[in-house]
């Protein structure tokens, strides 16, 4: 399939929890994976992944790469509500431990451990179909990229009224 | 939720480079994501992905999660080039650093640094469309399980935990 850019879905900074949940679920990558947001508060997001778009491993587990892809996506979901309006976070580093086969459906519990001026520190716990910890992923995001991207087409809209129009 | 499982083609142990390239590209996940194998020998593979299954970031870069998903697929393919015949490998840990936006196509240059009885140590450099390094990824694979990885069921893992 050809490379297409995702449409911009502006984060609802200053909005209600329901608006944030709507934002989580409407992101293009979220729709691809059938993401359902169970709870969201600034710095703590719990989501369930609906479908694996790749075939499962012979063991019946979700491909480890897709677990990572989803975890990285959760980084952004958890971090965004903790950031100033207009921020464009980007994953800088990520480290994962695979504790057991990730038998679906999977639940991702993503926490922001700290958000500073330049970095956010995150941890995602991934639970398997039986509620057991299947993987733990931690990482850092660079969160000071907004000024760098100012004026470029990548800039996230900060005006919610304009964004919602 | 799909319950479809990928059938793994057996690795061509003792085969030449063309055998390994054909094997790497015939893997169901490789076919699904359009992963091409540019070079392959035991312990070293070079792979390329041109098109992203997920929409690109608004910046035009591949979603970091997809960069990792492809990296983990590279770990699996590279590990099988040095694993003993009949064994399987499962990713135990993976660590990544994102150096710059990953503008596709992406090229993965993957090296197996050591392949022991129970662990394999692998690293890869990821290059963007302009040939600049955009990410580096290291990982360890567990290889002592052999067929254990082929038949894990919830009951198996329960029994394993209880034993």
Image (cartoon, coloured by chain):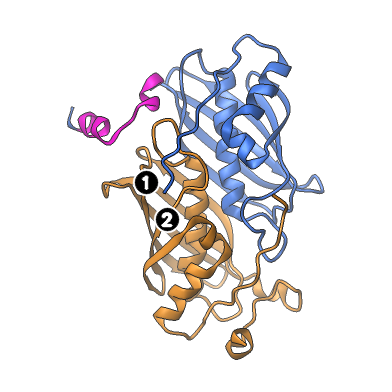
Residue B153 covered by magenta stretch: yes
Percent position of residue A8, x then y = 64, 72
On the image, numbered disc 1 is attached to which residue?
Answer: A104
Contact, mark 2 vs mark 1 (Cβ under 8 Å): yes
| Residue, far top | B14
Q: Is residue A113 above or below residue B47?
A: below
Q: Which chain is represented by orange in the image?
A: A
Query: Does dot 1 land on a helix, a strand or a loop?
Result: loop
Secondary structure predominantly adopted by residues drawn in magenta: helix
Identify the mark nearer the N-term, 2 or 1.
2
The residue range painted magenta reads B146-161
The picture quadrant where one finds residue B9 is top right
Left-right relation of A28 to A18: right
Residue at image location 54% in from the left, 80% down from the top:
A84
Q: Nearest the camera: A29 or A12?
A: A29
| Residue, far right | B130
Percent position of residue B83, x then y = 52, 18
Q: Which chain is represented by blue in the image?
A: B
On the image, numbered disc 2 is attached to which residue?
Answer: A49
Residue B26 covered by magenta stretch: no
Q: Is residue A25 above or below residue B161?
A: below
Residue at image location 66% in from the left, 20% down from the top:
B20
The picture quadrant where one finds residue B32 is top right
Chain of the residue that carries numbered disc 1 in the rendered image: A
Q: How many marks?
A: 2
Dot 1 surroundings within 10 Å: few (below 14), some, or many (20 or more)? many
Q: Which mark is residue A51?
A: none
Residue at image location 23% in from the left, 33% down from the top:
B155
Percent position of residue B3, x then y = 41, 41
Q: CA distance from mark 2 to mark 1?
A: 8 Å
Percent position of residue A65, x then y = 52, 43
């Amino acid at each position: 399939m050809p490379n297409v850019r995702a449409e911009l879905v502006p984060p609802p900074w200053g909005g209600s929890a329901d608006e944030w949940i709507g934002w989580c679920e409407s992101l293009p990558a979220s729709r691809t994976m059938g993401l359902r947001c169970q709870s969201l508060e600034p710095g703590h997001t719990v989501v369930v992944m609906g479908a694996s778009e790749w075939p499962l491993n012979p063991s019946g587990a979700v491909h480890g790469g897709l677990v990572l892809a989803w975890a990285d996506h959760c980084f952004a979901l958890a971090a965004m509500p903790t950031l100033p309006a207009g921020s464009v976070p980007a994953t800088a580093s990520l480290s994962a431990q695979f504790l057991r086969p990730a038998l679906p459906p999977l639940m991702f519990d993503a926490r922001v451990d700290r958000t500073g001026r330049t970095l956010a520190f995150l941890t995602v716990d991934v639970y398997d179909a039986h509620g057991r910890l299947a993987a733990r992923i931690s990482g850092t995001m660079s969160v000071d990229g907004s000024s760098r991207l100012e004026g470029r087409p990548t800039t996230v809209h900060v005006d919610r009224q304009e964004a919602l129009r | 939720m799909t319950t479809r499982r990928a059938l793994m083609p057996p690795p061509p142990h003792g085969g030449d480079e063309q055998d390994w390239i054909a094997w790497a590209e015939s893997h169901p996940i490789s076919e699904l994501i359009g992963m091409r194998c540019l070079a392959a020998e035991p312990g070293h593979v070079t792979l390329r992905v041109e098109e992203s299954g997920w929409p690109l970031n608004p910046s035009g870069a591949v979603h970091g999660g997809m960069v990792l998903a492809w990296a983990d697929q590279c770990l699996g393919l590279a590990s099988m080039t040095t694993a003993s015949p009949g064994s399987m490998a499962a990713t135990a840990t993976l660590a990544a650093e994102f150096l710059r936006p990953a503008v596709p196509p992406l090229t993965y240059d993957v090296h197996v640094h050591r392949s022991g009885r129970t662990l394999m140590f692998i690293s890869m450099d990821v290059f963007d469309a302009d040939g600049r390094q955009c990410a580096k990824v290291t990982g360890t694979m567990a290889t002592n399980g052999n067929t254990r990885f082929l038949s894990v069921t919830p009951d198996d893992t329960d029994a394993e935990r209880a034993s």
